[in-house]
Image (cartoon, grey):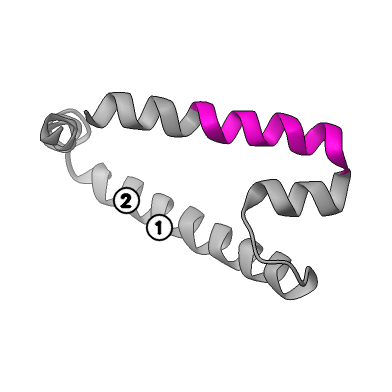
Amino acid sequence: GAGIFVLVGLGAKIAGPAIAISFLGCGMACILTSLAYSEFASLIPASGSAFTYTYVAFGECLAFCVGWFLILGYGFTASVTA
């Protein structure tokens, strides 16, 4: 499972010093995502994840799709890190 972390060294070899800019961009994306989730959490009284927020905001059909996307994403993540 730790082999996935070796790819950072490969990226640093290819990109050189620009990998620091890549990490800053990823950090900014994480900050904006956390701000979006905190905004949703303050507007919707139920606690939950993307499924709950989608269900409240857009309805059952789109929330069903988001729920399956989450399950597939968790499955792919577990298979990559296993």
Q: Quadrant of the N terminus?
A: top left
In the image, what residue occupies the spot 36% across and 56% down?
A: 24
Amino acid found under the numbered disc labelled 1: Gly
Q: Main secondary structure of the magenta part?
A: helix
Q: Which residues are magenta?
A: 59-72
Q: Quadrant of the C terminus?
A: top left
In the picture of the structure, the residue carrying the numbered disc 1 is 27
In the image, what residue occupies the spot 32% across and 51% down?
A: 23
Magenta-colored stretch includes residue 64: yes
Label 1 neighbour load within 10 Å: few <14, some 14-19, many 20+: few
In the image, what residue occupies the spot 68% across and 46% down?
A: 51
x and y percentages locating residue 13 in the rendered image: 12, 31
Examine the rendered structure and indicate whether residue 79 appears above or below residue 47: above
- Give the label on residue 40, or none: none
Q: Left of 46 or right of it: where is 73?
A: left
For residue 3, what is the image quadrant?
Answer: top left
Label 2 neighbour load within 10 Å: few <14, some 14-19, many 20+: few
Residue at mark 2 to residue at mark 1: CA–CA distance: 6 Å
In the picture of the structure, the residue carrying the numbered disc 2 is 23
The residue lying toward the viewer, choosing from 73 and 17, is 73
x and y percentages locating residue 38 in the rendered image: 63, 70
Amino acid found under the numbered disc labelled 2: Phe
Q: Are marks 2 and 1 in contact (CB under 8 Å)?
A: yes
x and y percentages locating residue 30 in the rendered image: 47, 57
Examine the rendered structure and indicate whether residue 30 appears above or below residue 61: below
The residue lying toward the viewer, choosing from 57 and 10, is 57
For residue 14, what is the image quadrant?
Answer: top left
